[in-house]
Image (cartoon, rainbow, N blue to C red):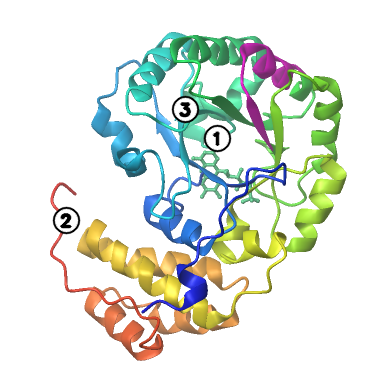
Amino acid sequence: MPCPAAAAHVAVPSDNRPLLLLAPMEGLLDATLRDVLTRAGGIDRCVSEFIRVTDTLLPHRSFVRVVPELLNHSRTRAGVPVRPQLLGSDPVCLAENAARLAELGPEGIDLNFGCPARTVNQSRGGAVLLDEPELVGRIVAAVRRAVPARVPVSAKMRLGYQDDRRAEECALAIADGGASELVVHARTKVDGYRPPAYWERIADLRSRLGGRGAPRLVANGEIWTVEDARRCQQVSGCSDLMIGRGMVSHPGLALAIRGAGDVPWEQVLHWLSDFWAQVSLRVERRHRAGRLKQWLGSLRRHYPQAGFAFDTLRLIHDPQLIEAWLQAHVPSDVLVSVAPQPDPVGC
Ligand SMILES: Cc1cc2nc3c(=O)[nH]c(=O)nc-3n(C[C@H](O)[C@H](O)[C@H](O)COP(=O)(O)O)c2cc1C
């Protein structure tokens, strides 16, 4: 039986309190971890990791592979909406694929203008597009035109590629293209993930975009604690936040920002065993242990106990031994047990 706090997903009232979004994180925050983190509570909406669009029209299964929540009305098990994200550079291809995706009833469609990966940038996708604000605007406008008005179109950008001089131009292009929301990761591509995040530049964008009719602005980058969240809100002028690594290392962070107390390790153990149960169902056997250790590696930042667990399991690859460790360390009243699973079909 899960402990009560674990089972409870904090309902999101429809008042005007700040939005807290779970960030897209390709290779780390997939549907399985989204599921567990949204069950932890406090998150209003997720953006999926990117789906790469080139010159082909993707079949439905390509979208569903990355965003299986599409089969559940674009929601996680906890009922939190998930917005698929597209990454590409050709307005026509993106528009056609967005229309195809819209057939699956996504909660919205997000566009990636921030990916720093060299392979992506070399094929003119992600952050490198920030050197071409006019193209950014055309992409947003084409996608906006291609999907029904009831499907929100949003964008996520960094401050620039080499430097932040064209950040305002890009934000204006995204606004003019018709995006209803703009998440700003307050760093350039060259900054990578190195602190600090330049939250004050989001305030500049906010004043440049003006008020009425402008997209809802969401601040992102380096929010690890409640104090970071408050300072980011103050400096950026945005009450709405997107959080990535902070949530992975501290799954109770969104709840804490909303005023709840810190989440004890025992609670995290429940989430870990829930995560493991789902990994065992969805992931190929030889990758299962790696997935658990990857999350433990992030949890170390907030929970010293995760560090001990990580050190113990570091060299273990056999899922049965991981299962045995969980059985031994997770109290039986919060353990989510899992029957031994063969490899999932289709992996
Ligand atoms: C491993 C990893 C994968 C990411 N994948 C994506 C992605 O698919 N799409 C995207 O827009 N941003 C992606 N990001 C950027 C995050 O969404 C976020 O902007 C960044 O981590 C800063 O926020 P944080 O400090 O709260 O983590 C990724 C970041 C990391 C670390």
Q: Quadrant of residue 272?
A: bottom left
Query: Residue beneath label 3, please?
Result: 87
Q: What x and y, as percent, mark residue 278?
A: 30, 63
Depth check: give the residue in front, 301 or 22.
Answer: 22
Secondary element at tag 1:
loop
Secondary element at tag 3:
strand
Depth check: give the residue in front, 259 or 223.
Answer: 259
Depth check: give the residue in front, 319 or 335.
Answer: 335
Q: What x and y, as percent, mark residue 190?
A: 68, 37
Task: Look at the numbered disc 1 and say if its residue's Cβ is closer than 8 Å to ligand 1.
Answer: yes
Closer to viewer: mark 2 or mark 1: 2
The answer to whether residue 203 is magenta is: no
In space, the residues marked 3 and 2 are separated at their CA atoms by: 28 Å
Q: Are marks 2 and 1 in contact (CB under 8 Å)?
A: no
What residue do we see at 82% from left, 23% from top?
A: 211
| Quadrant of the picture in which ligand 1 is shown | top right
Secondary element at tag 2:
loop
Task: Look at the numbered disc 3 and say if its residue's Cβ is closer than 8 Å to ligand 1.
Answer: yes
Indicate the amino acid at tag 3.
Leu
Query: Residue beneath label 1, please?
Result: 115
Query: Residue beneath label 2, please?
Result: 344
Q: Are marks 3 and 1 in contact (CB under 8 Å)?
A: yes
In space, the residues marked 3 and 1 are separated at their CA atoms by: 8 Å
Give the magenta-colored segment's residue range: 169-184
